[in-house]
Image (cartoon, rainbow, N blue to C red):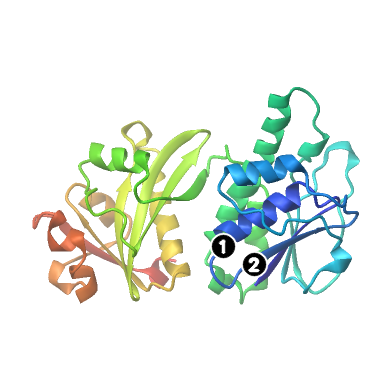
């Protein structure tokens, strides 16, 4: 699937969208960008910001929407509402959505203020892109109406929204390791190829972490932890919802878990109590099943399609 980030000048916001999307997107998804009246250059602050985030800017250029190498499947306009900015209207049989972001190139002031404007634009776009990629994309690709509704809703998302932002992180992330250690959860096996971990945050506060280990069509839900100060606010359920959506997107049909302290929580969330021996062989060979979690730990499973 091809995504076009479209604005007027194609020097700031659409560039940030294109390269951030391609940095995060799975195989089979690719973004490009263009402008209705391209400036002909990419703003150096956009390039510097992307590079500071570890995102490659190779091939970045300001180009016209008339010179696209291929037809997009999805068009995301990112024009803002300030100063009466006119947003280009892409004509064609594509899925269109609007993610308005104010143009940081128009901000004046100190270096710190201008840099903050670029950082804000990037943060908003990244939050929305992460929310986009957290959707059950394979399912939505065949339901155009539902896909547009989801993308339109994402276009209203701000990083400080109550829903928060989910960010893919390194399994050895220091905050993750510290949170797991504080909760008495395993940390010695972090970093295997099957693992993926996400941080849930909002307004600068970490709300929790969750991970999945994939083994064929089955997955191990692990490392779900909510900091003590954030408990009782529904963040655990949000972490489960997000993880199940990620499992569905990754082609998993069932999830398993072990817990020594939260059996009642998972039962209330719809998970089914199971015998440890019922788990698929690959799940049983995982470090958690093989010994990291005590034999007294409760075992649960969840059908991914049924949950969704």
Q: Is residue 20 above or below residue 32?
A: above
**21 or 45, nearer to the observer:** 45
Between 139 and 11, the residue placed more toward the observer is 11
Quadrant showing the C terminus: bottom left
Pointers 1 and 2 in contact (C-beta within 8 Å): yes
- Quadrant for residue 241, please give it: bottom left
155 left or right, relative to 177: right
Left of 72 or right of it: where is 230? left
Which residue in the structure is indicated by mark 2? 30
Which residue position is annotated with label 1? 25
Residue 166 location in percent, x, y? 49, 49
Q: Is residue 75 left or right of residue 131?
A: right
Q: Position of residue 39 (x, y in %)?
A: 88, 50
Residue 123 relative to residue 243: left or right: right
Residue farthest toward the top in the current orientation of the protein? 110
Would residue 165 be seen by someone viewing this image from the given angle?
Answer: yes
Q: CA distance from mark 1 to mark 2?
A: 7 Å
Name the one closer to the observer, 11 or 154.
Answer: 11
Indicate the position of residue 152 as horizontal and vertical percent values. 68, 56
What residue is at 71 percent from the left and 44 percent from the top?
46
The part of the image, by quadrant, that contains residue 278 is: bottom left
Image quadrant occupied by the N terminus = bottom right
Q: Nearer the viewer, residue 152 or 9?
A: 9
């Amino acid at each position: 699937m091809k995504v076009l980030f479209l604005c007027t000048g194609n020097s700031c916001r659409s560039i940030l969208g294109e390269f951030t999307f391609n940095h995060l997107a799975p195989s089979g998804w690719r973004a490009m960008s263009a402008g209705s009246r391209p400036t002909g250059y990419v703003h150096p602050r956009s390039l510097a910001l992307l590079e500071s985030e570890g995102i490659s800017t190779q091939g970045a250029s300001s180009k016209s929407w008339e010179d696209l190498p291929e037809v997009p499947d999805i068009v995301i306009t990112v024009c803002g509402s300030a100063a009466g900015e006119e947003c280009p209207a892409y004509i064609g049989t594509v899925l269109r959505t609007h993610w308005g972001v104010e143009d940081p190139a128009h901000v004046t002031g100190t270096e710190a203020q201008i840099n903050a404007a670029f950082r804000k634009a990037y943060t908003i776009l990244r939050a929305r892109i992460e929310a986009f990629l957290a959707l059950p994309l394979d399912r939505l690709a065949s339901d155009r109406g539902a896909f547009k509704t989801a993308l339109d809703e994402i276009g209203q998302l701000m990083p400080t929204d109550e829903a928060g932002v989910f960010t893919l992180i390194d399994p050895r992330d220091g905050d993750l390791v510290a949170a797991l250690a504080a909760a008495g959860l395993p940390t010695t096996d972090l970093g295997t190829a099957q693992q993926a971990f996400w941080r849930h945050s909002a307004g600068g506060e970490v709300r929790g972490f969750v991970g999945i280990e994939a083994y064929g069509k089955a997955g191990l839900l692990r490392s779900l932890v909510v900091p003590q100060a954030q408990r009782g606010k529904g963040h655990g359920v949000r972490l489960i919802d997000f993880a199940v959506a990620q499992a569905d997107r990754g082609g998993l049909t069932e999830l398993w878990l072990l817990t020594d302290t939260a059996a009642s929580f998972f039962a209330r969330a719809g998970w089914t109590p199971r015998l440890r021996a019922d788990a698929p062989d690959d799940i049983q060979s995982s470090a958690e099943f093989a010994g990291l979690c005590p034999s007294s730990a409760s075992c649960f499973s969840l059908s991914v399609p049924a949950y969704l």
